[in-house]
Image (cartoon, coloured by chain):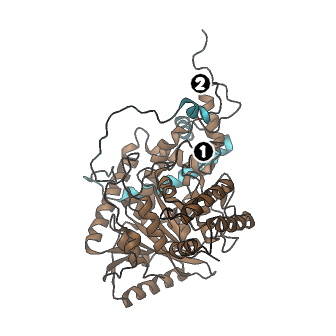
Amino acid sequence: MKLTRDQIEKLAHLARLEFSDSEMDEMMNDLDKMLGFVDRISELDLKGVEPLIYMNPEVDKLREDKAEIRITKEDALKNAPNRDTDYFRFPRVLKDS
Amino acid sequence: MAYSDYPSYRKELESGSLTVVAEVERILEKIDQSAHLNAYLEVFASDARARASVIDQKIAHKTAGRLAGMVIAIKDNLCFKDHKVSASSKILEGFQSLFTGTAIERLLAEDVVIIGRTNCDEFAMGSSNLNSAFGPVLNPLDNSRVPGGSSGGSAAALAAGLCHASLGSDTGGSIRQPASFTGLWGLKPTYGRISRHGLIAYASSFDQIGPFALNAYDSALLLEIMAGKDEYDSTCSEQAVPSYSKHIEEPVSKKKIAVFKSVLNHQGLDPAVQANFHQQIEQLKQKGHTVEEVDFDYLDYLVPVYYLLTTAEASSNLARFDGVHYGFRASEAEEPEAVYKKSRTQGFGKEVKRRILLGTFVLSSGYYDAYYGNAQRARRLVTNEMNTLLEKFDFILTPTTPHEAFRLDRKDTDPTVMYLEDIFTVLANICGLPAVSVPTGYGSSKLPLGTQLMGKAFSELELLQTAKQLG
């Protein structure tokens, strides 16, 4: 299958990515080839085959549901691109009406 | 003196003829002289020196751990507390890990020295190390060639003698292919053998941490220390960990080994690789093993299945990089959505964006079942086929790669050409099986060739024992 420019623009928005016009041309071309490549699996007869989702056959292990502090506030803020003493700083989400 | 294997090195340390301090100095000097390889993104020199002298004291007091003084390089997608980790991406600019991942924690508990973090393809996506935000890595055996990828820096560092062993991660061949290109042992353990806690995720149902080593013994020793259940990774197996290193030298019984006709007749197979592979088959037969040709009809579907599933998982795993809590944030963004979009657009490289887009597509409404769902069904089909084969055979033997290390200036106009580099390696990740690449000869340009042995889940001991008979 072939993706239209509109479809790729929508995918880019969903993935929170932006492309210039020339990058978009290149991306269309690349995705076209990638889809052509993965489309091969349509040749397989997969009717009635159960999807394989979990790679480890062992049953889930449970642990005590107990609260633990593993990261201090200072640590959590350590890698922030923008912060103050107590909070991450980020552009305002709600605007003044 | 060059390092050959851990037991000999340990003997030297214990006899007093060598100290960890001296060995670390020797290696740091060599790293300096090999800076052109671009294998290391950062060398933890002062850390390593300080640790070396503590370990020397432990050796003197006979309290040193089982890997005392082993100098290890780690791929730049493994978390080591208070050290930078970037997955070779601009989006993790300046990021320092708040914790140490389980595999590294266990190595440190046995007194290794972590010497530095190594270059790799961005977020482990690639087979050449050309996709790093910090430039390509050169193959130490021929500087005009790639070391392979994605764990290219870890392979180059060990092949150039800039560490004693190194760690990589393998999602579709990212340890085995570079091991093959640089003449090393590269092991991808069974899915769930080693905890993924502290490994920056690419495709969580495929990723495994594994060692690069100079021989089977070191591979076994590193595996045995890193493996085993972990409360921080629920996909990590609770199966007991055998003493791989203790049993590695034991003689192996006669094995039944399968080779795929579709691999033997594969179009892209270099004649030198083919010749080397046939020689390995003959050698195994001479040692009394049975090698049988079998049909395997899925070969050409493996890489497509791999890309459908891994890009889907990657698009989800990489959603966390949004410029909000850590890493790179685009400076000019003033609106919330613009922070996400501009930070991700400027922070990720081209191959990562391509894979995120494909992954977003295969998971999108209306296409999910035809692509992602069917790839999961195909994964079941292939896994069932392999499990059936592995009831009849102990191992599957293939070349690791279709050819020797390719040139750095190779230009592909189609991204899927590079994807086919992984044609023989993705199978182990699709099925969660262990596989090892062993150096077995040289190609027409005198560069190393590897042969891959793949076994049943959790058969690492027999896998490594049998792999010793190759080469």
Q: Where is residue B141 in the image (x, y as percent from the top left)?
A: 66, 74
Judged from the image, the secondary structure of the residue bearing numbered disc 1 is loop
Please state which of residues A42 and B62 is positioned toward the viewer in this rendering.
Answer: B62
Asked if badge 1 and badge 2 are on a common chain, one would say no
Q: Which mark is residue B82?
A: 1
Please state which of residues A72 and B392 is positioned toward the viewer in this rendering.
Answer: A72
Specify the amino acid type for callout 1: Asp
Asked if one can make out residue B110 in the rendered structure from this viewpoint, the answer is yes
The residue that disc 2 covers is A87
Chain B display color: brown
Chain corresponding to cyan in the figure: A
Dot 2 falls on which chain?
A
Question: Who's the residue at 59% across and 38% down the image?
Answer: A17
- Label 2 environment density (alpha carbons within 10 Å; few <14, some 14–19, many ≥20): some
State the separation of the CA atoms marked 1 and 2. 21 Å
Q: Which residue sits furthest bottom?
A: B286
Question: Who's the residue at 60% across and 56% down the image?
Answer: B121
Q: Where is residue B145 in the image (x, y as percent from the top left)?
A: 66, 70
- As drawn, B286 above or below B365: below
Q: Where is residue B61 in the image (x, y as percent from the top left)?
A: 53, 63
Please state which of residues B68 and B360 is positioned toward the viewer in this rendering.
Answer: B68
